[in-house]
Image: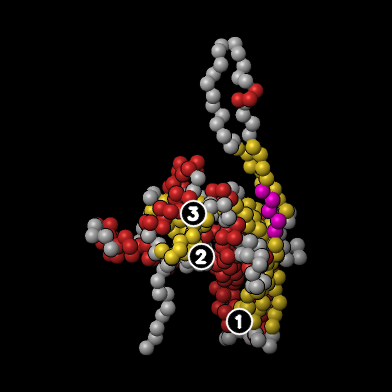
Protein backbone atom coordinates (compact mmCIF):
# COMPACT_ATOMS: atom_id res chain seq x y z
CA UNK A 1 0.00 0.00 0.00
CA UNK A 2 1.35 3.42 -0.94
CA UNK A 3 2.47 5.44 2.07
CA UNK A 4 0.66 8.71 2.83
CA UNK A 5 2.44 12.02 2.46
CA UNK A 6 2.26 12.49 6.25
CA UNK A 7 3.86 9.13 7.03
CA UNK A 8 6.55 9.70 4.38
CA UNK A 9 7.43 13.08 5.88
CA UNK A 10 7.45 11.69 9.42
CA UNK A 11 9.73 8.82 8.43
CA UNK A 12 11.97 11.27 6.55
CA UNK A 13 12.25 13.50 9.60
CA UNK A 14 13.29 10.53 11.71
CA UNK A 15 15.84 9.38 9.12
CA UNK A 16 17.30 12.85 8.64
CA UNK A 17 17.60 13.32 12.41
CA UNK A 18 20.26 10.61 12.29
CA UNK A 19 22.47 13.02 10.37
CA UNK A 20 22.47 15.78 12.93
CA UNK A 21 23.34 16.35 16.57
CA UNK A 22 23.87 19.32 18.87
CA UNK A 23 21.23 21.47 17.24
CA UNK A 24 22.03 20.48 13.68
CA UNK A 25 25.83 20.39 13.70
CA UNK A 26 27.42 17.27 12.27
CA UNK A 27 29.49 15.33 14.76
CA UNK A 28 33.26 15.02 14.07
CA UNK A 29 32.92 11.68 12.27
CA UNK A 30 30.08 12.95 10.07
CA UNK A 31 32.04 16.11 9.31
CA UNK A 32 35.07 14.11 8.18
CA UNK A 33 32.82 11.94 6.03
CA UNK A 34 31.21 15.00 4.43
CA UNK A 35 34.59 16.59 3.62
CA UNK A 36 35.81 13.27 2.22
CA UNK A 37 32.70 12.91 0.03
CA UNK A 38 33.24 16.44 -1.35
CA UNK A 39 36.88 15.60 -2.11
CA UNK A 40 35.91 12.39 -3.89
CA UNK A 41 33.82 14.26 -6.47
CA UNK A 42 35.49 14.70 -9.90
CA UNK A 43 36.40 18.35 -9.38
CA UNK A 44 39.54 20.33 -8.66
CA UNK A 45 38.94 19.85 -4.93
CA UNK A 46 40.00 16.19 -5.10
CA UNK A 47 43.59 17.30 -5.86
CA UNK A 48 44.15 20.40 -3.76
CA UNK A 49 45.13 20.66 -0.10
CA UNK A 50 42.31 20.57 2.43
CA UNK A 51 42.80 22.21 5.83
CA UNK A 52 40.08 21.43 8.42
CA UNK A 53 39.68 24.41 10.77
CA UNK A 54 38.47 24.48 14.36
CA UNK A 55 37.63 28.19 14.31
CA UNK A 56 36.66 30.90 11.78
CA UNK A 57 40.32 31.98 11.56
CA UNK A 58 43.40 29.78 11.31
CA UNK A 59 47.08 30.40 10.63
CA UNK A 60 49.33 28.09 8.63
CA UNK A 61 53.01 28.54 9.35
CA UNK A 62 55.57 28.52 6.53
CA UNK A 63 59.32 28.16 6.88
CA UNK A 64 62.08 27.95 4.27
CA UNK A 65 65.32 29.38 2.90
CA UNK A 66 65.29 32.06 0.22
CA UNK A 67 68.95 31.76 -0.80
CA UNK A 68 72.03 29.52 -0.70
CA UNK A 69 72.89 27.97 2.66
CA UNK A 70 76.08 26.10 1.63
CA UNK A 71 79.45 27.89 1.59
CA UNK A 72 83.12 26.99 1.34
CA UNK A 73 84.20 25.68 4.73
CA UNK A 74 86.72 27.84 6.64
CA UNK A 75 90.02 26.44 7.87
CA UNK A 76 89.89 23.85 10.61
CA UNK A 77 89.20 25.45 13.96
CA UNK A 78 87.53 28.53 12.47
CA UNK A 79 83.81 29.21 12.63
CA UNK A 80 81.79 30.22 9.60
CA UNK A 81 81.59 34.00 9.33
CA UNK A 82 78.37 35.47 10.72
CA UNK A 83 77.62 37.03 7.31
CA UNK A 84 77.41 33.53 5.82
CA UNK A 85 75.13 32.01 8.41
CA UNK A 86 71.66 31.16 7.15
CA UNK A 87 68.43 32.03 8.88
CA UNK A 88 65.17 30.53 7.67
CA UNK A 89 62.40 32.83 6.52
CA UNK A 90 59.14 32.34 8.39
CA UNK A 91 55.72 33.47 7.27
CA UNK A 92 52.07 32.76 7.96
CA UNK A 93 49.00 32.22 5.81
CA UNK A 94 45.79 33.37 7.45
CA UNK A 95 42.56 31.63 6.52
CA UNK A 96 39.37 33.52 7.39
CA UNK A 97 36.21 31.62 6.58
CA UNK A 98 33.08 32.90 4.85
CA UNK A 99 29.71 31.23 5.28
CA UNK A 100 28.00 29.49 2.36
CA UNK A 101 24.60 27.83 2.28
CA UNK A 102 22.89 25.17 0.17
CA UNK A 103 19.21 24.26 0.09
CA UNK A 104 18.05 20.88 -1.26
CA UNK A 105 14.37 20.06 -1.91
CA UNK A 106 13.48 16.36 -1.85
CA UNK A 107 10.01 15.45 -3.24
CA UNK A 108 7.96 13.02 -1.16
CA UNK A 109 8.04 10.33 -3.86
CA UNK A 110 11.85 10.39 -3.83
CA UNK A 111 11.74 10.14 -0.05
CA UNK A 112 9.36 7.18 -0.19
CA UNK A 113 11.63 5.20 -2.52
CA UNK A 114 14.69 5.84 -0.40
CA UNK A 115 12.98 5.31 2.96
CA UNK A 116 11.79 1.91 1.78
CA UNK A 117 15.35 0.99 0.79
CA UNK A 118 16.80 2.52 3.95
CA UNK A 119 19.12 4.80 1.96
CA UNK A 120 17.70 8.26 2.67
CA UNK A 121 20.74 9.55 4.55
CA UNK A 122 23.05 8.41 1.74
CA UNK A 123 20.77 9.98 -0.88
CA UNK A 124 20.76 13.35 0.89
CA UNK A 125 24.53 13.41 1.32
CA UNK A 126 25.14 12.31 -2.27
CA UNK A 127 22.84 15.02 -3.65
CA UNK A 128 24.42 17.72 -1.51
CA UNK A 129 28.06 16.78 -2.02
CA UNK A 130 27.83 16.21 -5.78
CA UNK A 131 26.47 19.71 -6.38
CA UNK A 132 28.29 21.47 -3.53
CA UNK A 133 31.68 20.28 -4.78
CA UNK A 134 31.01 21.82 -8.20
CA UNK A 135 29.87 25.09 -6.63
CA UNK A 136 32.93 25.14 -4.38
CA UNK A 137 35.16 24.68 -7.44
CA UNK A 138 33.45 27.68 -9.03
CA UNK A 139 34.25 29.86 -6.01
CA UNK A 140 37.74 28.36 -5.75
CA UNK A 141 38.56 29.34 -9.33
CA UNK A 142 36.32 32.28 -10.22
CA UNK A 143 35.78 34.05 -6.91
CA UNK A 144 36.20 37.83 -7.18
CA UNK A 145 35.35 40.25 -4.39
CA UNK A 146 34.48 42.83 -7.08
CA UNK A 147 32.00 40.48 -8.78
CA UNK A 148 28.34 41.44 -9.12
CA UNK A 149 27.54 37.80 -8.30
CA UNK A 150 26.92 37.69 -4.54
CA UNK A 151 28.30 34.17 -4.20
CA UNK A 152 31.48 34.80 -6.22
CA UNK A 153 32.05 38.05 -4.31
CA UNK A 154 32.59 36.13 -1.07
CA UNK A 155 36.32 35.71 -1.72
CA UNK A 156 39.00 36.11 -4.38
CA UNK A 157 39.58 32.76 -6.07
CA UNK A 158 42.74 31.21 -7.45
CA UNK A 159 42.60 33.20 -10.69
CA UNK A 160 42.25 36.55 -8.92
CA UNK A 161 44.96 35.72 -6.38
CA UNK A 162 47.52 34.79 -9.08
CA UNK A 163 49.27 38.09 -9.83
CA UNK A 164 53.05 37.56 -9.74
CA UNK A 165 53.51 35.62 -12.98
CA UNK A 166 50.93 36.30 -15.67
CA UNK A 167 51.20 35.29 -19.34
CA UNK A 168 48.72 37.04 -21.64
CA UNK A 169 48.51 35.93 -25.27
CA UNK A 170 47.64 38.67 -27.74
CA UNK A 171 46.29 37.70 -30.15
CA UNK A 172 44.75 34.66 -28.50
CA UNK A 173 46.53 31.35 -29.00
CA UNK A 174 45.19 27.81 -29.17
CA UNK A 175 46.02 25.44 -26.26
CA UNK A 176 49.15 23.95 -27.80
CA UNK A 177 52.72 23.14 -26.85
CA UNK A 178 53.64 26.76 -27.67
CA UNK A 179 51.16 28.00 -25.04
CA UNK A 180 52.31 25.57 -22.36
CA UNK A 181 55.95 26.40 -23.15
CA UNK A 182 55.27 30.07 -22.39
CA UNK A 183 53.66 29.08 -19.11
CA UNK A 184 56.60 26.90 -18.12
CA UNK A 185 59.13 29.62 -18.88
CA UNK A 186 57.18 32.13 -16.82
CA UNK A 187 57.58 29.94 -13.71
CA UNK A 188 60.67 30.69 -11.58
CA UNK A 189 63.30 27.98 -12.14
CA UNK A 190 63.43 27.01 -8.46
CA UNK A 191 59.93 25.51 -8.69
CA UNK A 192 60.57 23.45 -11.84
CA UNK A 193 62.60 20.70 -10.19
CA UNK A 194 59.66 18.29 -10.13
CA UNK A 195 57.43 19.00 -13.11
CA UNK A 196 55.56 15.73 -12.71
CA UNK A 197 54.08 17.03 -9.44
CA UNK A 198 52.81 20.20 -11.14
CA UNK A 199 49.67 20.69 -13.24
CA UNK A 200 48.34 22.83 -16.03
CA UNK A 201 44.68 23.39 -15.17
CA UNK A 202 42.51 24.51 -18.06
CA UNK A 203 38.88 24.23 -19.18
CA UNK A 204 37.54 20.97 -20.67
CA UNK A 205 37.32 22.67 -24.08
CA UNK A 206 40.94 23.77 -23.85
CA UNK A 207 42.02 20.25 -22.96
CA UNK A 208 40.07 18.87 -25.92
CA UNK A 209 41.76 21.35 -28.25
CA UNK A 210 45.18 20.35 -26.94
CA UNK A 211 44.36 16.65 -27.30
CA UNK A 212 43.23 17.36 -30.85
CA UNK A 213 46.56 19.02 -31.65
CA UNK A 214 48.31 15.87 -30.43
CA UNK A 215 45.93 13.67 -32.41
CA UNK A 216 46.93 15.49 -35.62
CA UNK A 217 50.46 14.08 -35.34
CA UNK A 218 51.11 11.21 -37.74
CA UNK A 219 52.52 9.02 -34.99
CA UNK A 220 51.27 6.24 -32.69
CA UNK A 221 50.58 8.94 -30.10
CA UNK A 222 48.36 10.78 -32.56
CA UNK A 223 46.37 7.62 -33.32
CA UNK A 224 46.00 6.83 -29.62
CA UNK A 225 44.45 10.22 -28.88
CA UNK A 226 41.45 9.44 -31.07
CA UNK A 227 41.20 5.64 -30.92
CA UNK A 228 42.68 4.66 -27.56
CA UNK A 229 41.54 4.83 -23.95
CA UNK A 230 41.70 8.27 -22.38
CA UNK A 231 44.86 8.50 -20.28
CA UNK A 232 45.27 12.28 -19.98
CA UNK A 233 47.60 14.67 -21.78
CA UNK A 234 51.10 15.89 -21.00
CA UNK A 235 53.07 18.99 -21.94
CA UNK A 236 56.82 18.98 -21.32
CA UNK A 237 56.40 16.42 -18.55
CA UNK A 238 53.50 18.27 -16.88
CA UNK A 239 49.97 16.75 -16.83
CA UNK A 240 47.36 18.95 -18.52
CA UNK A 241 44.11 18.54 -16.61
CA UNK A 242 40.67 20.05 -17.06
CA UNK A 243 38.65 21.78 -14.35
CA UNK A 244 34.97 22.06 -15.20
CA UNK A 245 34.53 25.65 -13.99
CA UNK A 246 37.77 27.08 -15.42
CA UNK A 247 37.03 29.84 -17.99
CA UNK A 248 37.87 28.74 -21.54
CA UNK A 249 40.39 31.55 -22.06
CA UNK A 250 42.40 30.91 -18.89
CA UNK A 251 44.71 28.34 -17.32
CA UNK A 252 46.75 27.94 -14.14
CA UNK A 253 50.15 26.29 -13.76
CA UNK A 254 51.14 25.28 -10.23
CA UNK A 255 51.36 22.45 -7.70
CA UNK A 256 47.91 21.08 -6.71
CA UNK A 257 48.80 21.14 -3.00
CA UNK A 258 49.78 24.79 -3.34
CA UNK A 259 46.05 25.55 -3.39
CA UNK A 260 44.44 25.44 0.05
CA UNK A 261 40.76 24.93 0.82
CA UNK A 262 40.07 25.72 4.46
CA UNK A 263 36.81 24.34 5.84
CA UNK A 264 35.52 24.93 9.34
CA UNK A 265 34.55 21.74 11.16
CA UNK A 266 31.20 23.08 12.38
CA UNK A 267 29.03 22.02 9.43
CA UNK A 268 25.29 22.27 10.01
CA UNK A 269 22.43 20.38 8.36
CA UNK A 270 18.85 21.39 9.20
CA UNK A 271 15.50 20.27 7.78
CA UNK A 272 12.01 21.65 7.28
CA UNK A 273 8.90 20.62 5.38
CA UNK A 274 6.98 22.43 2.65
CA UNK A 275 3.66 20.60 2.93
CA UNK A 276 2.07 22.51 0.04
CA UNK A 277 4.85 21.57 -2.38
CA UNK A 278 5.18 18.12 -0.74
CA UNK A 279 8.92 18.34 -0.31
CA UNK A 280 11.41 17.96 2.51
CA UNK A 281 13.82 20.90 2.64
CA UNK A 282 17.40 20.19 3.70
CA UNK A 283 19.66 23.19 4.39
CA UNK A 284 23.45 22.90 4.63
CA UNK A 285 25.68 25.68 5.96
CA UNK A 286 29.47 25.67 6.20
CA UNK A 287 32.32 28.14 6.42
CA UNK A 288 35.26 28.06 4.00
CA UNK A 289 38.25 30.03 2.70
CA UNK A 290 40.72 29.60 -0.17
CA UNK A 291 44.36 30.65 -0.42
CA UNK A 292 47.67 29.82 -2.12
CA UNK A 293 50.43 28.62 0.16
CA UNK A 294 53.04 30.17 -2.18
CA UNK A 295 51.59 32.60 -4.69
CA UNK A 296 55.03 32.98 -6.29
CA UNK A 297 54.74 29.36 -7.46
CA UNK A 298 51.78 30.09 -9.74
CA UNK A 299 51.53 31.10 -13.39
CA UNK A 300 48.24 32.42 -14.72
CA UNK A 301 47.65 32.24 -18.46
CA UNK A 302 45.18 34.51 -20.28
CA UNK A 303 44.11 34.51 -23.91
CA UNK A 304 43.64 30.84 -24.81
CA UNK A 305 41.50 30.29 -27.90
CA UNK A 306 39.35 27.14 -27.85
CA UNK A 307 37.53 27.90 -31.10
CA UNK A 308 33.78 27.68 -31.62
CA UNK A 309 31.93 26.31 -28.59
CA UNK A 310 28.38 26.94 -29.80
CA UNK A 311 25.92 24.16 -30.57
CA UNK A 312 23.23 24.02 -33.23
CA UNK A 313 20.01 22.06 -33.44
CA UNK A 314 18.00 20.95 -36.43
Image position, residue 220 (x, y; %): 24, 57
> What mark, if any, has residue 107 been given in the picture?
1
Residue farthest along the front direction in this orientation = 170
> Is the residue 3 above or below the residue 57 in the image?
below
Q: Which of these two is toward me, 300 or 229? A: 300
Quarter of the image containing the C terminus? bottom left
Which is more foreground, mark 3 or mark 1? 3
> Is the residue 13 above or below the residue 54 in the image?
below
Which is more foreground, mark 2 or mark 1? 2
Q: Which of these two is toward me, 313 or 106? A: 313
Image position, residue 235 (x, y; %): 38, 53
- To which residue does mark 2 refer? 246
- To which residue does mark 3 refer? 253
Q: Is residue 42 left or right of residue 121?
A: left
Q: Earlier in the sequence, mark 2 or mark 1?
A: 1
Element type where label 2 sits in the image: loop
> What mark, if any, has residue 5 been given in the picture?
none
Q: Quadrant of residue 172?
A: bottom left
Q: Which of these two is toward me, 258 or 6? A: 258
> Is the residue 198 above or below the residue 286 in the image?
above
Task: Please tell me whether residue 150 belongs to the stretch shown in magenta.
Answer: no
Callout 2–callout 1 Cβ contact below 8 Å? no
- Residue at the image point whose x is 55% and y is 31% from the top: 68
- Counting labels gives 3
The span shown in magenta is 93-97
Q: Earlier in the sequence, mark 3 or mark 2?
A: 2
Quarter of the image containing the N terminus? bottom right
Image position, residue 36 (x, y; %): 57, 58
Alpha carbon distance from label 2 to label 1: 32 Å
Image position, residue 243 (x, y; %): 49, 63
One can see residue 62 in this view:
yes
Alpha carbon distance from label 3 to label 2: 13 Å
Amino acid sequence: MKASNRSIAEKADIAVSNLVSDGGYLNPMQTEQFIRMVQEQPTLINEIRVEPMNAPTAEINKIGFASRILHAAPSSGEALASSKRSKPITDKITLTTKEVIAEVHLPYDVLEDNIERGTLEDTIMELITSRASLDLEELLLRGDTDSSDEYLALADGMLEQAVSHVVTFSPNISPSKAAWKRGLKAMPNKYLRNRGAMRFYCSPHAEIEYADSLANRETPLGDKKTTGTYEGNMAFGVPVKSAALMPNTKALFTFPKNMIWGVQREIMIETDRDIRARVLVVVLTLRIDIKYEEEDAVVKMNGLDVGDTTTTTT
